[in-house]
């Protein structure tokens, strides 16, 4: 196996990545696609090596008493490695955004101006337990012509290392230089922090993981950050909400995959709708075993509901629990979302077009839904093919980020001596 | 006159701005345009008040011994106030980017997806001496539906205050709430620093001014930053450069407006071209009084050239001085730019298409020129109508930033009960 050197400094790795990025930026789409398919094949061929390394992480996790959810995210299998490979094959089929001419015009003096899409350069990826990010992020970075510096969580260190070793082995057979994929083997915090300020060598940092990881990056990085993923998503059930739609969307948004960022965490219910439909709502919570934390009026209506503390309104439960507040109108709902929302995904259930208009105009979030589940905020579901994360910031990219989010533009000007 | 309260905290101002932004985001293009024209008229009507306030800043500047260039940037006149007003009239004629549907598609399940362009929200503008920024930035912010928090330099505090007071007076006659334009009257550093971390209330910070101001913002802000303006621009004169084009572009890029960020600061000259054309180059430097700081081979060729120190290669002279290095090929030029460039504007002068290709592919900057002056990196020159600054970063916006750079997108989804 190719060995990842542990004695190389983070800075040296970033410099190598920048060098790799230059070479990579000159490759054709075909060369990049061929490389992705090679990595996919070689990953599958080395499934045993990867699973062996994964065993170590699982043993470690058991010793440290990780909970079932964490162990599940960590655990690899023949199928999961095949999924990694199939993911890369999928990415190889996506359109290559780089090289596209977005606009072109000629000034009166004859100077031709082209806006050309180009790779960002070097992407710094800081993430937690899931080893699949190692492969997914690498595939998206390489396809869009970017080098990547990977800094995974220590709980998956053996798995990640093995995966990168296999990917390096594969890259040796391709036109993509191995330097374009750097893995930071050190598990100490300093290594991560060095990435934060390496503006000369790293073009963007993408943190993926829990709120505290993301906050640490946002608060400490001078390298520009693409903030992803924290979703305290709301569902507002209006006075004029259709009861069938309301209940089915609520149940889907809360229970389909409670642990993901586009799951609903708070339901805001119009008092008049509640009067009419409290039986249906009570039954739904009961049928799906959903724990409810509510305000005073909720407690008076939903049997078994617990009192919501201030913290509940801001909480991402990521499990079968929901906060519920009874409101008197859409304005109150919008105001609540303004205070507690994370600008991810917010939904309104109503048949009243004026309420829809107001909600869509005044709620500030990446994705706003009318009569649909917040679960659609996802690159796959929206047809982007794959995503590097879901941006909850407003600059550069918002919502699910596909390949174009990993690019920037260059103005390319052609003249014959033009001066001002 | 409306008085700007000095006892209101920066946070309170940011909260008011956010509130103003909400109301502003609901206005039509016509309402915004009408407001801009009203501000323009009221500014002209109050020219005397503005000039009286400007006198105080000029007296202050004289006492503090400001140099001529700074005094010139600070000084207002009837004509300059008219220019402010005309600038706003110009902005009123630009296309309003907000509300545009960028793409729209429908998923197989019938869920309609729209990508809609919306204002960023609240823009924090941190700038130095020029009072024109107070008006220009406000005009661009309001036209794109954004509130603005202005923090100008202390040297122009009286002028800026008077301008904002007049703008507030004007806004009283329009549909745009006065809250949408906040001016931080305090001149202490803490007021600026408070803006750096106000993520809840401010959506983006735009610093405009010298390198140290910009670095302070980039290094300390957790609010996302649009980095602008530092330009260490290079001109590479290749072996196969046409001498007429090379000389006229060099002179234009260096001397047309030496103090601006798109002026050339270093010329990299191919040794063979220099052998043939040193007489012409020497004459040009002499005719235009350009001070030259050069490497060894430059010193051997250009009479009167001074030795370039390491710092010269990174220097933005912003005056009639240039650094010059003799190189053996385009690769050496590209490498030099990689080390010392600021990703602003870089030019290659050559008739060799292969050299052009390499330069365009490998140089990493917002704007790359073939046989034209770097002076065209400017919103006005490129036909954007107006610019809020020139971005030298890669995320969100690159190069001259017009109105679209002050917007983001929202995904607006319409369904009839879709769930996953």
Image (cartoon, coloured by chain):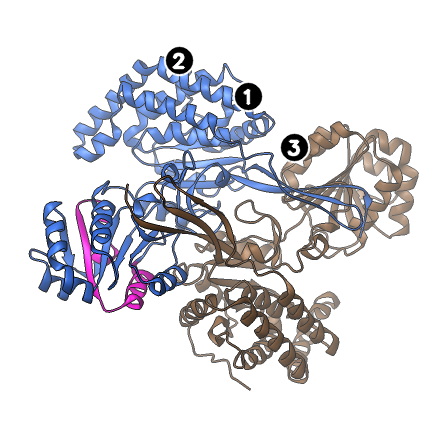
Chain colours: A brown, B blue
Q: Nearer the viewer, residue A327 or A100?
A: A100
Q: Badge 2 is on which residue?
A: B1
Q: Nearer the viewer, residue A355 or B20?
A: A355
**Which percent across, then down, holds residue B412?**
68, 41
**Which percent across, then down, holds residue B183?**
42, 28
Q: Which residues are magenta?
A: B312-340
Q: Badge 3 is on which residue?
A: A361
Q: Are marks 3 and 1 on the same chain?
A: no
**Which percent across, then down, holds residue B163?**
36, 22
Q: Is residue B185 visible?
A: no
Residues at circles 3 and 1 in contact by the CB criterion of under 8 Å: no
How far apart marks 3 and 1 lie (CA) works out to: 17 Å
Q: How many marks?
A: 3
**Which percent across, then down, holds residue A155?**
62, 71
How far apart marks 2 and 3 lie (CA) works out to: 34 Å
How far apart marks 1 and 2 lie (CA) works out to: 24 Å
Mark 3 — on which chain does it sit?
A: A
Q: Are marks 1 and 2 on the same chain?
A: yes
Q: Badge 1 is on which residue?
A: B31
Decide whether residue B338 is among the magenta residues. yes
């Amino acid at each position: 196996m190719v060995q990842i050197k542990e004695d190389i400094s983070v800075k040296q790795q970033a410099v190598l990545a920048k060098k790799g990025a230059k070479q990579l930026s000159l490759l054709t789409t075909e060369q990049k696609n061929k490389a992705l398919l090679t990595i996919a094949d070689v990953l599958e061929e080395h499934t045993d090596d990867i699973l062996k390394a994964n065993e170590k992480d699982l043993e470690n996790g058991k010793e440290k008493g990780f909970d079932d959810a964490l162990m599940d995210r960590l655990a690899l299998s023949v199928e999961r490695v095949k999924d990694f490979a199939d993911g890369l094959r999928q990415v190889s089929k996506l359109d290559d955004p780089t090289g596209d001419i977005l606009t072109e015009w000629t000034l009166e003096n004859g100077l031709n101006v082209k806006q050309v899409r180009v790779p960002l350069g070097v992407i710094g990826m800081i993430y937690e337990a899931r080893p699949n990010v190692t492969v997914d992020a690498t595939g998206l970075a390489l396809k869009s012509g970017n080098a990547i510096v990977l800094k995974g969580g220590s709980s998956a260190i053996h798995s990640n290392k093995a995966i990168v070793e296999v990917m390096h082995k594969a890259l040796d057979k391709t036109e993509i230089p191995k330097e374009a994929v750097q893995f930071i083997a050190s598990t100490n915090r300093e290594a991560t922090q060095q990435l934060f300020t390496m503006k000369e060598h790293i073009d963007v940092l993408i943190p993926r993981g829990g709120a505290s990881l993301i906050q640490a990056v946002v608060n400490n990085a001078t390298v520009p950050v693409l903030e992803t993923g924290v979703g305290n998503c709301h569902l507002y059930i209006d006075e004029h909400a259709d009861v069938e739609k309301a209940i089915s969307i609520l149940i889907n948004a809360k229970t389909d995959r409670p642990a993901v960022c586009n799951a609903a965490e708070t339901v805001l219910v119009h008092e008049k709708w509640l009067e009419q439909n409290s039986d249906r709502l009570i039954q739904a919570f009961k049928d799906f075993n959903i724990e409810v934390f509510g305000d005073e009026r909720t407690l008076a209506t939903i049997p078994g509901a617990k009192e919501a503390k201030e913290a509940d309104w801001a909480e991402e439960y990521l499990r079968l629990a929901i906060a519920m507040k009874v409101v008197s109108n859409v304005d109150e709902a919008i105001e609540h979302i303004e205070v507690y929302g994370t600008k991810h995904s917010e939904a309104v259930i109503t048949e009243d077009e004026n309420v829809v208009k107001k909600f869509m105009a005044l709620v500030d979030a990446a994705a706003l839904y009318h009569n649909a589940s917040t679960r659609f905020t996802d690159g796959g579901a929206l047809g982007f093919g794959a995503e590097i994360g879901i941006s909850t910031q407003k600059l550069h990219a918002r919502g699910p980020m596909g390949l174009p989010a990993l690019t920037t533009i260059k103005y390319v000007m052609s003249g014959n001596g033009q001066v001002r």
